Image: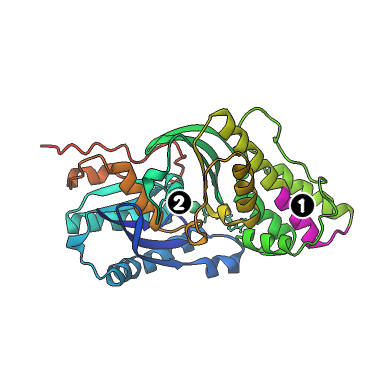
Amino acid sequence: MLVLGIETSCDETACAIVKDGTFEVASTLATSREFHELTGGVVPEVAARKQVDFILPVISSVLEKANLTSTEIDAIAITIGPGLIGSLLVGVEAAKALALAWQKPLIPVNHLVGHIYGVYLGIDPNTIEFPVLVLIVSGGHSDLVLMHGHGDLEYLGGTVDDAAGEAFDKTARLLGLSQYLGGVKLSQKAAECKSNTIAGMLPRPKINDPDYDFSFSGLKTAVRRLIETASYPIDVVACEFETAVVDVLVTKTMRAAKEHNVKAVILGGGVAANNSLRSRLQFESDALSLPVLIPPLNLCGDTAVYIASAAYFLNKDKKLVFDPNLLSSIQADPSLDIISSGYERDDTPKN
Ligand code: KG4
Ligand code: ZN
């Protein structure tokens, strides 16, 4: 089954064609990041206008790369949320127009659920046994969910304030490393640290709480206080901050994995690109002989590849049909959470 996926939740305009949920046929991505770097944050209207500029060239480019025509595509998958409403609307309306023109079924996909499928590319999906403990860490979300099967998610916990990526970005700004999406820069700075001479000086928020929630906004404030009281080298502060976030994420993930007796752990989201998080999660899972699936770096950040993959797995046992009456029920939803499916569709043709 060939699914053409479209992702426009924020500042990336992405399109990909994926076969049977695991094989990437072609993928293209355009980004308006350079404009947001100028303003030190996303201006939603600028992001939406850039989505309009990029969407058609990106779709054409994928079809050209794949050397396929629309008739060979079986379904279209579209991110419906969460994200910026203007950006989402561009993708959703473009996808509806394509579905109508090509007479293909349109599958709505939750962006956060999509992140889970970054680990399904290039593998035999049957090697992943359920239940799986999933940790999604991105710029807007930090969620721990129990995955009992495709489309069967149980929420365990999430951030009560800033998401992990947001904490990285705000701290990178505080340390003067980057004005926009500074997670990578902070991580690179932390890697320069030879010895963390201030180990333990920052809090590990909620690390010993019995729940599975996270709280990272206090950590950023603690960094501010730390650098106001003494002049520590930036690489050391970055390392201590990164270690604190990773300590909390990995400790709570491993505790949930043990308590729920899962068969594997899946990591996803932009922060999954963090080397320290990847290696600590791998190390702790290895210690328990628990398989851990970590996406390759190109499938951590936003892309349409795993949107198309998710659409395949969430619908592989259903008979997908094109029904123009269903299109109006597919709506952009900027505040969707990981448990709100966006894929519970009534595919029964209406008379
Ligand atoms: O999933 P994503 O690309 O977009 C959202 O859906 O939010 O995640 C973006 C987030 C940003 O906060 C970015 O700074 C963070 O992921 N990020 C990182 C790293 N690479 C990206 N955070 C820490 N270390 C990294 N290497
Ligand atoms: Zn994302």
Q: Is residue 195 left or right of residue 112?
A: right
* Residue positioned 46% across, 52% down in the render: 84
* Dot 2 alpha-carbon crowd within 10 angstroms: few under 14, some 14 to 19, many 20 or more: many
Q: Earlier in the sequence, mark 1 or mark 2?
A: 2
Amino acid carrying mark 2 in the image: Val
Q: Position of residue 5 (x, y in %)?
A: 33, 56
Q: Secondary structure at mark 2?
A: helix
Question: In the rendered image of this protein, does residue 114 appear above or below residue 144?
Answer: below
Q: Image quarter for residue 215?
A: top right
The magenta-colored residue range is 231-243
Task: Tell me the number on the disc at residue 240.
Answer: 1
Q: Secondary structure at mark 1?
A: helix
* Residue positioned 18% across, 47% down in the render: 324
Residue 217 inside the magenta-drawn segment: no
Foreground residue, 140 or 75?
A: 75
Task: Tell me the number on the disc at residue 119.
Answer: 2
Q: Main secondary structure of the magenta part?
A: helix
Residue 309 appearing in the image: yes
Q: Position of residue 71 (x, y in %)?
A: 17, 61
Q: Position of residue 25 (x, y in %)?
A: 32, 63
